[in-house]
Image (cartoon, rainbow, N blue to C red):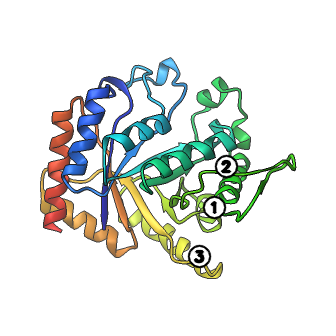
Amino acid sequence: MKLGISIRLMGEASTRGTIQECARAAEEAGLDDLWVPDHIAIPPDDAEGSGGRYLDPLASLAWLAGSTERIGLGTGVLILPYRPGLPTAKWIATIQELSEGRMRLGVGVGWMRAEFKALGLSRSDRGRSTDAQLELLRRCFFAEEDVVVENEQPFLFRPKPPCPPIFIGGAGEHALQRTVRFGDGWMPMGADPARLRPDIARLHALAQDAKRPTPEVICLGALETTDPYRGASQLNELAEIGVTRFVLGGRYRSAGEFRTLVDRLVAIRTAA
């Protein structure tokens, strides 16, 4: 199983030096991926732990691409309805190009009502907007020649590096169907095998019916990090039900605290 870790782009841990030191610590430890969250407009009553301070995920990954050499760079997850389609596709292609193929694109429909309101967007349209952006992304990356969008203006999409793997976040039937239609994998929150097992079985059945390859499953969640053998047992249970990647989330206030999380995750990987 591939192992990644979340980097906080919010609050006191989101300084330039801390982010850079955390990214390099994860890379030096041999972890597979770094993952960053996405918020644009936090309301005052939901700012605990961040103070409303959030860095942009795509700008942050572009910067981290120049601060690292090997480790994967993922959005966990990028809220597509918050952003215009073509400029977002250009951001993604640029990060993929400059990182030499290290981008991992986790995407979601979003949930925070106040954030949609602050952006002047209809929350009820978020599913349709996400699907439209995913269709555009695929056209941009996979069209052999010109790309044509709804206004019938053909254009060249360059650079055109290999499309990063697309992982669909969210829960429920819509997320599973969206994964099979557009994605390379599903990215649920949580690490409870009993809760995930039926959804993973349903995802595999949908992929088989659609004659698609078996999708990856990338869990974002917590582990028992103080006991490496218990943590390894959790990972083994997840692997048995079809989880292919795990991304450890956790709060930390400094690069030193982050390095402790990294060391514990490496110990779990060794114990597994």
| Residue occupied by mark 2 | 130
70 left or right of 179 in image: left
- Residue wearing tag 1: 178
Left or right, residue 20 beside residue 77: left
First reached walking from the N terminus: tag 2 or tag 3: 2
Is residue 196 among the parts visible in the rendering?
A: yes
Q: Amino acid at mark 1?
A: Arg
- Labelled disc at residue 207: 3
Q: Earlier in the sequence, mark 1 or mark 3?
A: 1
Specify the label residue 105 is tagged with.
none
Depicted 205 relative to depicted 182: above or below: below
Q: Amino acid at mark 3?
A: Ala
Whole-percent x and y of residue 9? 38, 32
Q: CA distance from mark 1 to mark 3?
A: 11 Å
Give residue 102's quadrant in the image.
bottom left
* Disc on the earlier residue, 2 or 1: 2
Q: Amino acid at mark 2?
A: Thr
Figure quadrant of residue 49 = top left
At a point 55% along the width and 25% down the height, the residue shown is 41
Q: Sort mark 2 into few (<14), some (14-19) or many (20+) by Cα contacts within 10 Å.
A: many
Q: Residues within 10 Å of mark 1 (few under 14, many from 20)?
A: many
- The answer for how far apart the CA atoms under marks 2 and 1 are is 9 Å
- Judging depth in this view, the residue of 28 and 263 nearest the camera is 28
Give the SS element for disc 1.
helix
Q: Quadrant of the C terminus?
A: bottom left
Residue 45 image point, x, y percent: 48, 20
> Tags 2 and 1 in contact by the CB under 8 Å rule?
yes
Residue drawn at (51%, 67%), measured in percent from left and top? 199
